[in-house]
Image: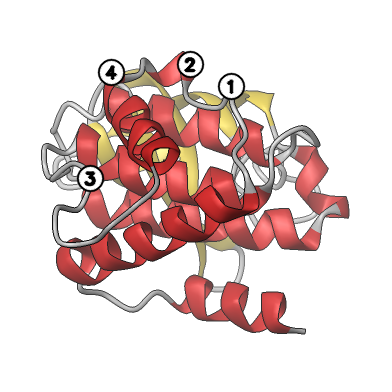
């Protein structure tokens, strides 16, 4: 008898395997970040074609083997279809997926990181909040979720509103993060602070971030 498990999560990455298969990386609520093989997922008539793309969020049915998982089925509740018509938002989103991949591990409790990722991708599709602000909030809250956030910088003079925004992001519930906008001056200072945090704590160059920066320079 096959041993199936049901997990709730989001596809972070999908890589081709062989002629017709895919290997997917899923950030799950129950088992942290896991990889699974999706047999035949690149065949046109496969039910897994649309269910194994990055950004897909929902429940996934997996066969748990001795050393690996196999993806059998999925019920997707949010495909984040808006990114198909929003190149900039999609590239921001891919960067968020990469950061989530970097920070998460198998069998860790990653529920907060999954929720942060989901809320942040939704925020990218909101016209009421700039993508740039969503990015800085996401980067700072990622550090807070993972217990690394140092708070407002003490070696740099920043506006009171900037300090308040940073402290708010660190303390706010995940469902309350994307409820404000800031002035251009505060946004500029948040950019500088987020840059310092990335340099200090991430220490990794993401290809998706390079693509995003090239895109924003055009």
Q: Quadrant of residue 21?
A: bottom right
* Left or right: residue 130 compared with residue 135: right
* Left or right: residue 150 compared with residue 173: left
Q: Is residue 173 above or below residue 194?
A: above
Residue 102, numbered label? none
Tag 1 secondary structure = loop
In the image, which is nearer the foreground, mark 2 or mark 3? 3
Marks 2/3: CA–CA distance: 19 Å
Residues packed near mark 4 inside 10 Å, few (<14), some (14 to 19) or many (20 plus): few
Residue drawn at x 16%, y 67% is 200
Marks 4/2: CA–CA distance: 44 Å
* Res 36 seen here: no
Disc 1 marks which residue?
179
Quadrant the C terminus occupies: bottom right
Residue 6 percent location from the top left of the image: 38, 18
Residue 1, numbered label? 4
Residues packed near mark 2 inside 10 Å, few (<14), some (14 to 19) or many (20 plus): few
Disc 2 marks which residue?
176
Disc 3 marks which residue?
152
* Left or right: residue 118 compared with residue 192: right
Residue drawn at x 56%, y 43% is 134
Q: Tell which circle, 4 or 2, labels the residue nearer the N-terminal end.
A: 4
Residue drawn at x 70%, y 47% is 49
Q: Quadrant of residue 111?
A: top left
Residue 73 percent location from the top left of the image: 55, 29
Marks 3/4: CA–CA distance: 54 Å
């Amino acid at each position: 008898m096959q041993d199936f498990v049901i997990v709730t999560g989001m596809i972070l990455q999908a890589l081709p395997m062989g002629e017709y298969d895919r290997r997917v990386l899923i950030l799950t609520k129950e088992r942290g970040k896991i990889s699974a093989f999706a047999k035949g997922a690149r065949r046109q008539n496969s039910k897994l074609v649309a269910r194994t793309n990055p950004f897909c969020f929902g429940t996934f049915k997996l066969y748990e083997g001795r050393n690996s998982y196999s993806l059998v089925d999925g019920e997707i509740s949010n495909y984040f279809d808006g990114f198909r018509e929003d190149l900039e938002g999609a590239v921001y989103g891919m960067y968020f997926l990469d950061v989530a991949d970097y920070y998460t591990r198998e069998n860790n409790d990653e529920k907060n990181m999954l929720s942060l990722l989901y809320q942040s991708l939704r925020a990218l599709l909101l016209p009421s909040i700039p993508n740039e602000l969503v990015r800085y909030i996401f980067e700072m809250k990622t550090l807070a979720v993972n217990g690394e956030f140092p708070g407002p910088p003490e070696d740099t003079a920043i506006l009171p509103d900037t300090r308040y925004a940073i402290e708010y992001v660190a303390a706010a519930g995940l469902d309350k993060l994307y409820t404000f906008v800031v002035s251009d001056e505060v946004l500029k200072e948040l950019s500088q602070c987020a840059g310092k945090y990335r340099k200090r704590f991430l220490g990794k160059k993401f290809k998706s971030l390079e693509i995003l920066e090239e895109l924003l320079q055009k």
